[in-house]
Amino acid sequence: MSEAGGRGCGSPVPQRAPWSLVAATAAICLVSATSVWTAGAEPMSREEKQKLGNQVLEMFDHAYGNYMEHAYPADELMPLTCRGRVRGQEPSRGDVDDALGKFSLTLIDSLDTLVVLNKTKEFEDAVRKVLRDVNLDNDVVVSVFETNIRVLGGLLGGHSLAIMLKEKGEYMQWYNDELLQMAKQLGYKLLPAFNTTSGLPYPRINLKFGIRKPEARTGTETDTCTACAGTLILEFAALSRFTGATIFEEYARKALDFLWEKRQRSSNLVGVTINIHTGDWVRKDSGVGAGIDSYYEYLLKAYVLLGDDSFLERFNTHYDAIMRYISQPPLLLDVHIHKPMLNARTWMDALLAFFPGLQVLKGDIRPAIETHEMLYQVIKKHNFLPEAFTTDFRVHWAQHPLRPEFAESTYFLYKATGDPYYLEVGKTLIENLNKYARVPCGFAAMKDVRTGSHEDRMDSFFLAEMFKYLYLLFADKEDIIFDIEDYIFTTEAHLLPLWLSTTNQSISKKNTTSEYTELDDSNFDWTCPNTQILFPNDPLYAQSIREPLKNVVDKSCPRGIIRVREESFRSGAKPPLRARDFMATNPEHLEILKKMGAASSIDAEDGLRFMQEMIELSSQQQKEQQLPPRAVQIVSHPFFGRVVLTAGPAQFGLDLSRHKETRGFVASSKPYNGCSELTNPEAVMGKIALIQRGQCMFAEKARNIQNAGAIGGIVIDDNEGSSSDTAPLFQMAGDGKDTDDIKIPMLFLFSKEGSIILDAIREYEEVEVLLSDKAKDRDPEMENEEQPSSENDSQNQSAEQISSSSQEVDLVDQESSEENSLNSHPEALSPADMDNAASISPSEQTSNPTENHETTNLNGECTDLDNQLQEQSETEEDSNPNVSWGKKVQPIDSILADWNEDIEAFEMMEKDEL
């Protein structure tokens, strides 16, 4: 997200400009609004803001310092094993690895963050390292989109602040545009990707060999996402303006022009994926989250940076469509571009959290407050924003890779309003990061927000964006060594100076927008707003918007979530047939089915919704017997709960979701397989026994350790190298007999997770763990017993210990594709295995209908309209795309004959991935 500056209060905004392009700059037009907005709130003291700002600085030092110590010059840090992630040396994570180009990604992405955080000496050292060590000519295939926003943007942001510091006269006096020359070199390496008939770039390119050459190993792709092709203009235009080489801006403009031409003309929406050669939409669903998000962002920011009115007109046209079809306050739900009144999903992804910030830049404050508050309530429920969550706020995809978009929107809402409420939101983000994500070697992404388990992953955007926005949130103007209002933020939070708008203007600014659409200027002809309009003389205005959403996640039904025919219901018309109510023996139901798709567009919409519900209902019924993942948390010195391992549940023994967690020291059983009476009962008495998988039934192992006095058991997989990151979650079944005699909890760990505990035992001897349904808060009393110096020592020891076992513990991130996850370790689920087990696919791990302790059912206070929402969102999981639609709805095959186009649309929806 970005901040627009440079227009003073009372200055007229160009005719079609949204009246609050300056809304994101509290220092300009909204300074008087702050006192009005915050009259009913307690402002945060200067001392507390400084304390929180200093806390952010310490957190950055912890992340950046561990990267430089344990990972540099690798692209990213693996914080659980305290080593660098190098492309080709770690198991592939699929598309996620396309960001890695062996160019010290995290260092380049962090350059301008160092200056924002007043670490100018470290910045100067970092620039020298980049110039000395980074090679951009590697034989590696990278994402054009990621390389542009992270590396090209990072180099340009670093150059922007390097010349600023040089001008101030204290630092960077030796600098002579070296970062800019590297950026220009990289820009030319990306240009071959645009060699298509449409002008849309290929999604990937080989840094050394380009496109199509045999050595390139790329150039055969046909599709790209809208954001991938539409998020280039800021970096490429800045490169042209800095260097005078117009070719970069020309190529980026051509791509944007093509996307604009290919929008769906009746809805003014764009799809998620497009064919780069034909311009046909491959995925025809549309939203503001993954796949499209930064396309909209860059249209508005291109106007701010370049001053081209056509970009603003396009943004306004799209924004009107978004608010008309996608925005269903407080939700933002994907729709079909050809049938925008029909929702394409019943869930939202985490990337849409940037949108409230963009709405602030647009000047549409009220919906920004509503959506932001809804997201905050989800965070308060799960500690972090899940990668995807349903319309009734249950987890759909449970991962959280420490994304910064919510912090970004929090910062811009505070800048626009001055409301101290958003400082408290930022404080919560800081506390959750330190409590749940901090590990001895940095900050680890969350594999599952429900259990608190970690991934061995710390993405570069965490340092590029998260700490920047959090620090700026609590910083006063005098805390920053330059005027932040003179810069615009890219989507990766890199800083580009606004003076570029008047530099090297050699690009034609022909306004092509009016050739395609008639615009309603009524919403766009404002000048700088006054407080009486933006905040209508009500000191509790913002609070009044937030208040109805306070309990929306846990107790209340969200209002207006599903757009239906309210007028019809008021007039007494019957609500549409729901899948859960359908009975094949009911003649009235069969008659309704026959009308679906034939009588009117409304009937067709009902029919499509009914089919979707039937699929989801069938999927839910198949999952009713599955249990959610559990957590094994190491709570003893020096871990203190920082390391959380994802564990598979058992269908017998103590149910950790209904009983208090089990805590105890661990001990290996003898024999290790636990298949006979233990020979070391004194060692496992009152402890949690470690047992190896194999040679007998799980229930038999449980009985043997229980008879020896163990209070719990952890079964460790005997398939060396297996990991919960790459294999489906394992669920231990009974032996076909009555297992009520087993009273202790039993959990399953794959080999790599189990190795972490075994290595800890070898290093520290006494290792205490917590078995629970989800990770618990860390024990501050135990941590406080350590003196600061000894705590650092213990953290270093822990880091060294984990690093020393890194050859055995090679955790793979779960953001690899679901297909890879399902197929990586088929041997772990071999039917020939003596252990009787059931497996859960990664996508199923993240949404479990039996998760009663996490989900609060919507209650009877909801209106009929809202109850329909609950019914539509009964399940969190898309159905299996490999199951044919005909098999899903056998009784009405003949009725579906004329619905081929709509069925194809839903099948594409079933394959949605972030």
Image: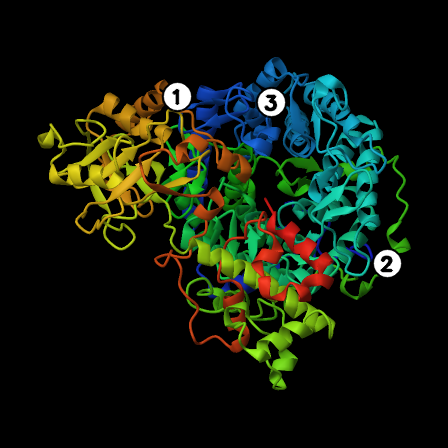
Comparing 140 with 342, the one in front is: 342
Outermost residue, bottom direction?
Answer: 571
Comparing 121 with 603, the one in front is: 603
Q: Quick one: label 2 or label 1, which is nearer the N terminus?
A: 2
Instruction: Tell me the element at label 2.
Output: loop
Question: Residue 216: image x %, image y %?
Answer: 71, 20
In the picture, residue 231 is in which quadrant?
A: top right
Mark 1 and mark 3 residues within 8 Å of each other at the beta carbon? no
Answer above or below: position of 54 versus 590. Answer: above
Label 1 neighbour load within 10 Å: few <14, some 14-19, many 20+: some
Q: Quick one: label 1 or label 3, which is nearer the N terminus?
A: 3
As drawn, is 237 to the left or to the right of 786?
A: right
Outermost residue, left direction?
Answer: 682
The image's mark for residue 806 is 1
Q: Residue at x 69, y 65 (%)?
A: 341
Q: According to the image, label 2 marks what residue?
A: 517
Q: In the picture, which quadrant includes the C terminus?
A: top right
Label 2 neighbour load within 10 Å: few <14, some 14-19, many 20+: some
Q: CA distance from mark 3 to mark 2?
A: 50 Å
Nearest to viewer (mark 2 / mark 1)? 1
Q: Quick one: label 3 or label 2, which is nearer the N terminus?
A: 3
Nearest to viewer (mark 1 / mark 3)? 1
Q: CA distance from mark 2 to mark 1?
A: 58 Å
Question: Residue 171: image x %, image y %?
Answer: 60, 22
Type of the residue with mark 2: Thr
The image's mark for residue 171 is 3
Question: Residue 675: image x %, image y %?
Answer: 20, 32
Residue 817 seen anywhere in this rendered image of the structure: no
Instruction: Tell me the element at label 3.
Output: loop
